[in-house]
Image: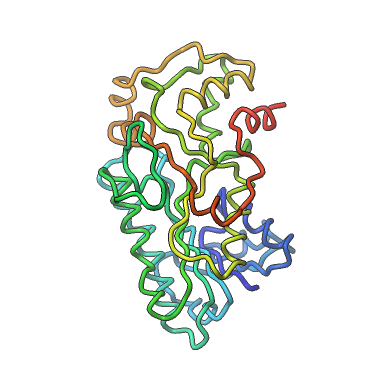
Amino acid sequence: MRVIITGGSGFIGSALIEELTASGHEPIILSRNPERTGARFKGEAEAVFWDGRTANGWGQLAEGEAIVNLAGANIGAGRWTSKRKEVIRNSRVNAGQAVCDAVAKAEIKPKVLIQASAVGWYGPQGATPVDENSAGPGQGFLASVCRDWEASTREVEEAGVRRVVIRSGVVIDKDGGALEQIMKPFRFHAGGVIGHGRQGFPWIYRRDEVRAIRFLLEHKEHAGVYNLCAPALDSFRDFLIGLGRAMRSPAWFPVPGFALRAALGQMAEEMLLSGQFVRPSRLLESQFSFECESLNRLLEQLFK
């Protein structure tokens, strides 16, 4: 099928394009710089101009068979000032509204929309595991952003478009994303457990992330919310100690929570010092098969 992708040049989007192309689909990337993006994905995907806010110039492309909306500013790019919070929220909500406008203008509606979100929707949950049936959204900035992000494309369902919301955990691979930032102190043998370390750390191998998106695109019986994370319920301590072992750089230097709060404020509290233990119940019920369910196995594989 033809698959229109916003955020296609990002960490997840670029891997998704490879996955879709290899599976015989036709990705179309919406980009502010289509020449540069097209050159990067030459032979794999077509790039079309998009201003990042409206449906201008690509409304007719909604006649493609599918849309994957991954657009959104990086939430981990720095301290959450009021201005940065506005950028994070608006980049997601504006993209969602553009998708809705494009679908409304299209004479032939797309068959499916994959709408990105994150496990941050559940808010800090302590030691209590959550899944798609849990109440929410939770408390905090991330939860409120995810709530608005998901709601931004809800109206396409009224047009008869099957909509799947993917609440992703921390997407792990060696060449980018969160791991690239987390592993920096370990390269200098200065890594350690962050805070008390008991906070939940829902993660997913990037290969499983894009395989799950393709699975949900191709199987028309699936709609609604799906958690995209590995079935294992690992803590941040589990991850950091496993990372140190895999990098042969033990987690010897604990990072106290007060230091992170002083440096990064609310961002540290919500992204590093609290978390969730999340189950991908609906993916498991659908018989989706993960390539990597073990955190230690994944880290060993990435750093062997």
Question: Residue at image x 61%, y 47%?
Answer: 208
- The quadrant where residue 303 appears: top right
Is residue 132 or residue 88 the one in the foreground? 132
**Quarter containing the N terminus:** bottom right
Question: Residue at image x 37%, y 52%?
Answer: 133
Relative to residue 46, is residue 214 depicted above or below?
Answer: above
Image location of residue 185, percent across then percent down: 52, 21
Q: Residue furthest front?
A: 285
Image location of residue 173, percent across then percent down: 61, 39
Question: Residue at image x 51%, y 23%?
Answer: 240
Is residue 82 or residue 19 the one in the foreground? 19
Relative to residue 110, is residue 289 depicted above or below?
Answer: above
Q: Residue furthest bottom?
A: 107
Is residue 251 or residue 52 the one in the foreground? 251
**Quarter containing the C terminus:** top right
Relative to residue 183, is residue 283 depicted above or below?
Answer: below
Relative to residue 183, is residue 143 depicted above or below?
Answer: below
- The quadrant where residue 82 appears: top left
Q: Residue furthest top?
A: 252
Image location of residue 67, percent across then percent down: 53, 69
Image location of residue 29, percent across then percent down: 58, 65
Q: Is residue 38 left or right of residue 11?
A: right
Numbered disc total: 0
Q: Is residue 89 left or right of residue 41?
A: left
User: How is the structure coloured here?
Assistant: rainbow
Question: Residue at image x 51%, y 76%?
Answer: 58
Is residue 124 or residue 265 the one in the foreground? 124
